[in-house]
């Protein structure tokens, strides 16, 4: 099947009101813009939208991103921009979310444009190269006038409270003649939510300024910013640096400039022609051309173009020199256009090769695994942040797939730091086996980062590490020895043979997330080879997995760290019981996807495991109900269990735990607060958990109510349940807003939930039901 493309650039205007002398569109090798229309027509925009929608349906994409670009896109004017966006959106099916952004030089940005972009949810990225002197080296009008004050006026608009959520960030092109710290400080003064630095477009035929005069001058320039940014506590995400770190860990880099991930991007020019990335304009005349148009060719046709296909091949598309380079994973060969050399095309290292080698080692560095333990809980990994749009989607209840991936990356970073803290615990005594396991993990992290990430994301890694950090010295060595099992699991996933001493617990040695081996060995440890997993069927118990269109997760009834002291976790499920579990979970996942598809799409990405428990735990109220280790939920799969409800409600806890680890919503020291639906006061944290669960359950029962269509069997139950959960959301948000000092994030979160729930209709427009006492009834025990 043809490859997927999820990002599109629409050149809505082909001219610019500035005359930047470093612009790759007008000042470099490809001059095809001269023969193309000044602006994109509505027919081109509509056809582009139709092609994107067609491709999204064919590949089952739930989200695409479209960048409105130029030239200068704001030259189309407010009415023209409104018509273009409307024509584009009109083609998109409801099941496909379309994120929109615009990249502008900022001089034409106005309140009217901001109101338009607010209406359509368009994020605004602005190009600025620093203070006035730095910016005016290149970003000037054709007559030489400065554009700096007008750009800053536009940025001031984006800092206003009513438009702040539209502020996408600032893009800065590197110029060695500018002082990097002055540039960094000038950009931070504009309070951007994120920054990115762009190397000047160049090739081996037309090298960048001062190329080769001194070793790695661009790495030196960017390195000074990285050192200052790191010393400042990384006050704002910088895409280039963060992408290098992500790529080094085997996570998609979020940038076409670095990393080995495929570049799944297509461009539509003003005339409707399909083109490759704009940066290729720096190579040679018509380099981005595909010979295809939106009127004659589909997106699948575009993915078959040799140039597009090459940029989606990652490592395989690199030259031999890059493939042999030790920093190839984070570097990725640099931007594709920068590899061009007449005679052999793009089969070369980047013209910035020397700079990328130095910069990559500084940014990724040897500190990837370092965690700092501050008290019992305070182990922190690298910072991650949700985009405003992703945060607001979680605040509306469901969240987004992209936001869930950010939460997973955050948990992965946290778990890395936790494991590092365990390995370096100064209280340890006999550290030989643990040191061997740690050494293996660090080696595998460089050669098999995907497998390391898969092991470290297993939900039971965190409770094990936390138990180690809390353990007294008499139990420490026994708890820490489990690290060798973590290393063996990573080696098995990487297809490598590693022999390590694994601790024995109740006759089993454990490889977290993989399985357990039954041993008759007498002693605290047994030498175990990861190669034996597939060869010891008689003694091997695998962690079972469920793979359906709606669920992909482990059902872990083996891990020794899967339960809390008061959690009635089951033992190993017998085969017949596992069959029942598998069928009930599959049915519950399918029903959740049918009733609340937005929730189900995020759940499929973010829920790593369910942990079997006895039925009693799911009937509990409050903190213990279904809340397993991070990334998992406790489930009792019985014939009378509503699995769709259990999965959706439990996954709300998973998401909220991740959000509360990332953001402060309230002060942890606030005393318990009384709520109308519970006889006892609850902690503020617990009110948030119940609020978030009720919000999802209100959506679930609202869908069931709509499907019931007046059925006497299910209609009254669905109506009562929907009104119950909606009422509790309203009461919880009112209580939190009036009685608890919330942070900006906390207030934004409950406001989003309230808005979502108030938008749901019970089918009759009536007030929520209440019990005679004035409290909502709780007939469902939820």
Image (cartoon, rainbow, N blue to C red):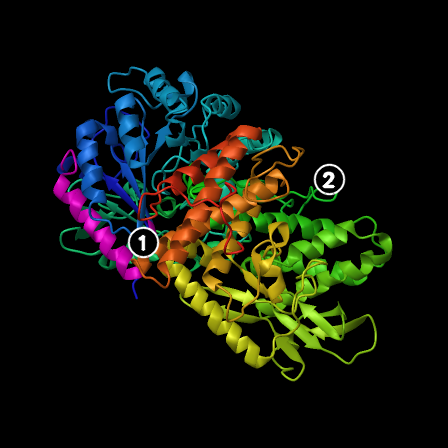
**x then y, percent, for residue 333:** 44, 50
Residue 519 within the magenta-colored segment of the rendering: no
Q: Is residue 96 left or right of residue 581?
A: left
SS at mark 2 in the image = loop
Residue 374 shows which numbered tag? Answer: 2
> Which disc number belongs to residue 282?
none
Closest to the observer, 403 or 140: 403
* Residue 239 drawn above or below residue 560: above
Res 480 → quadrant: bottom right
**Residue to which mark 1 is pinned:** 5
Q: Quadrant of residue 358?
A: top right
Along the viewing direction, whichever of 196 and 676 lies nearer the viewer: 676
Determine whether 740 is above or below 496 in the image: above
Q: Is residue 68 left or right of residue 542?
A: left
Q: Is residue 550 visible?
A: no
Which region shows up in magenta?
37-63
Residue displayed at 58% across by 40% down: 362
Query: Is the N terminus in the top left, top right, bottom left or bottom right quadrant?
Result: bottom left
Characterize the magenta stretch by its predominant secondary structure. helix
């Amino acid at each position: 099947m043809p490859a997927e493309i999820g990002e599109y650039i629409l050149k809505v205007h082909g001219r610019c009101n500035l005359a930047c002398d470093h612009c790759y569109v007008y000042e470099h090798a490809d001059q095809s813009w001269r023969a193309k229309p000044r602006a994109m027509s509505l027919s081109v925009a509509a056809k582009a939208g139709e092609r994107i929608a067609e491709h999204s349906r064919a590949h089952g994409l739930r989200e695409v991103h479209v960048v409105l670009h130029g030239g200068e896109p704001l030259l189309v004017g407010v009415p023209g921009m409104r018509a273009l966006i409307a024509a584009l959106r009109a083609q998109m099916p409801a099941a496909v979310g379309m994120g929109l952004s615009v990249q502008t030089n900022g001089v034409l940005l106005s309140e009217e444009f901001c109101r338009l972009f607010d209406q359509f949810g368009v994020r605004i990225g602005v190009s600025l190269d620093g203070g006035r002197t730095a910016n005016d080296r290149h970003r000037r009008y054709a007559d030489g006038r400065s554009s700096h004050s007008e750009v800053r006026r536009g940025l001031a608009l984006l800092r206003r409270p009513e438009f702040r959520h539209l502020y996408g960030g600032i893009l800065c092109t590197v110029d060695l003649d500018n002082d990097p710290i002055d540039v960094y400080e000038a950009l931070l003064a504009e309070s951007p939510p994120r920054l990115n630095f762009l190397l000047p477009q160049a090739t081996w035929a037309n090298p960048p300024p001062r190329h080769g005069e001194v070793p790695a001058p661009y790495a030196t320039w960017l390195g000074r910013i990285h050192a200052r940014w790191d010393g400042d506590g990384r006050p704002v995400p910088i895409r280039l640096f963060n992408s290098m770190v992500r790529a080094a860990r085997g996570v998609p880099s979020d940038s076409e400039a670095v990393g080995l991930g495929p570049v799944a991007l297509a461009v539509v020019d003003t005339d409707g022609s399909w083109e490759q990335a704009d940066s290729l304009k720096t190579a040679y005349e018509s380099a981005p051309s595909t010979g295809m148009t939106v009127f004659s060719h589909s997106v699948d046709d575009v993915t078959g173009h040799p140039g597009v296909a090459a940029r989606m091949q990652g490592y395989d598309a690199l030259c031999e020199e890059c493939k042999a380079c030790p920093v190839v994973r984070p570097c990725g060969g640099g931007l594709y256009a920068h590899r061009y050399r007449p005679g052999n095309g793009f089969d070369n290292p980047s013209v910035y090769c020397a700079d990328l080698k130095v910069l990559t080692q500084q940014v990724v560095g040897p500190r990837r695994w370092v965690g700092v333990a501050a008290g019992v809980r305070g182990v922190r990994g690298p910072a991650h942040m949700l985009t405003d749009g992703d945060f607001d989607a979680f605040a509306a209840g469901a969240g987004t797939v992209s936001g869930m991936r950010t939460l997973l990356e955050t948990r992965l970073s946290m778990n890395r730091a936790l494991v590092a803290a365990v390995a370096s615990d100064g209280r340890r005594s006999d550290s030989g086996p643990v040191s061997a396991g740690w050494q293996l993990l660090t080696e595998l992290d460089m050669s098999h980062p995907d497998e390391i990430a898969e092991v470290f994301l297993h939900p039971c890694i965190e409770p094990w590490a936390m138990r180690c950090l809390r353990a007294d010295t008499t139990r420490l060595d026994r708890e820490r020895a489990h690290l060798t099992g973590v290393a063996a699991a990573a080696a098995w996933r990487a297809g490598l043979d590693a022999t390590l001493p694994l601790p024995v617990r109740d006759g089993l040695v454990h490889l977290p997330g993989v399985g357990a081996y039954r041993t008759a060995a007498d002693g605290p440890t047994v030498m175990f080879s990861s190669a034996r997993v597939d060869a010891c069927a008689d003694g091997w118990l695998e962690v079972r997995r469920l793979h359906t269109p709606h669920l992909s997760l482990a059902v872990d009834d083996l891990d020794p760290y899967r339960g809390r002291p008061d959690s009635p976790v089951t033992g190993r499920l017998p085969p017949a019981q596992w069959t029942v579990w598998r069928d009930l979970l599959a049915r519950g996942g399918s029903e959740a996807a049918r009733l609340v598809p937005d929730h189900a799409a995020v759940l499929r990405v973010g829920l790593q495991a369910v942990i079997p428990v006895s039925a009693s735990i799911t009937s509990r109220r409050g903190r213990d109900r279904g809340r397993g280790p991070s990334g998992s939920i406790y489930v009792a799969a019985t014939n009378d269990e509503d699995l769709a409800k259990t999965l959706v409600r439990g996954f709300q806890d998973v998401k909220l735990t991740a959000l509360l680890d990332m953001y402060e919503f309230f002060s942890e020291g606030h005393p318990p607060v009384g709520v109308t639906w519970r006889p006892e006061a609850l902690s503020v944290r617990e009110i948030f958990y119940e609020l978030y669960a009720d919000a999802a359950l209100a959506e679930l029962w609202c869908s069931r109510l709509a499907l019931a269509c007046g059925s006497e069997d299910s209609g009254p139950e669905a109506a009562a349940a929907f009104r119950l959960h909606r009422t509790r959301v309203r009461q919880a948000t009112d209580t939190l807003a009036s009685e608890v000092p919330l942070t900006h994030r906390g207030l934004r979160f409950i406001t989003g939930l309230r808005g979502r729930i108030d938008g749901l209709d019970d089918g009759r427009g009536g007030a929520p039901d209440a019990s005679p006492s004035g409290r909502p009834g709780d007939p469902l025990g939820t």
